[in-house]
Image: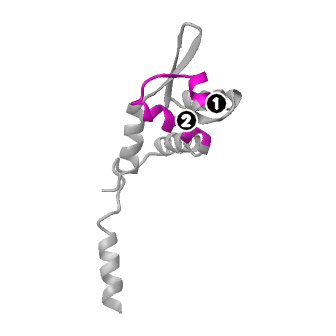
């Protein structure tokens, strides 16, 4: 029985470091804020719609139609995602469009990757 406990403990030591190494207090605060923004089902749903289309820009009205959420709810979530730097917002004529910023998601994947 003791041998199986030691083996389990030894196996766990192979997976003890984040892909980005130790986080500074500032980095931990920054990443926690980003994950907090992502910790909402509506925001994750909107991100999935944007990503489903190959990260091409989509208008607020298009996202409202596809998601089934109300326009004010969609706008609120998009604002939070944009303020966090996860999306980029621009105008195209009378429409406001949003696009995923993939570089920030690549950074978050690196932080979560266990080496």
Residue 63 position in % (x across, y down): 57, 28
* Image: 19 above or below 26: below
Which residue occupies 53% across, 19% down?
Answer: 97
Badge 1 element = helix
Kindly identify which residue carries mark 2.
46
Q: Would residue 51 appear left or right of 1 to someone viewing this image?
A: right
In terms of sequence position, does the residue under pointer 2 or pointer 1 come before the other? Answer: 2
Depth order, front residue of 67/107: 67
Figure quadrant of residue 83: top right
Quarter of the image that includes the N terminus? bottom left
Badge 2 element = helix
Local packing at callout 2 (Cα closer than 10 Å; few below 14, some 14-19, many 20+) is many
Which residue occupies 37% across, 38% down?
Answer: 106
Quarter of the image that includes the C terminus? bottom left
Kindly identify which residue carries mark 1.
74
Secondary structure mostly taken by the magenta-highlighted segment of the chain: helix
**Magenta stretch?**
42-65
């Amino acid at each position: 029985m003791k041998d199986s406990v030691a083996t389990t403990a030894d196996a766990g030591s192979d997976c003890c470091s984040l892909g980005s190494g130790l986080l500074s207090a500032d980095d931990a605060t920054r990443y926690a804020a980003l994950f907090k923004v992502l910790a909402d089902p509506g925001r994750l749903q909107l991100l999935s719609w944007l990503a489903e289309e190959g990260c091409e820009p989509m208008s607020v009205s298009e996202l409202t139609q596809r998601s089934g959420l109300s326009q004010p709810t969609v706008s609120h979530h998009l604002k939070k995602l944009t303020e966090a730097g996860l999306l980029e917002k621009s105008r195209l004529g009378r429409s406001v469009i949003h696009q995923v910023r993939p570089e920030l998601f690549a950074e978050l994947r690196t932080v979560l990757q266990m080496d």
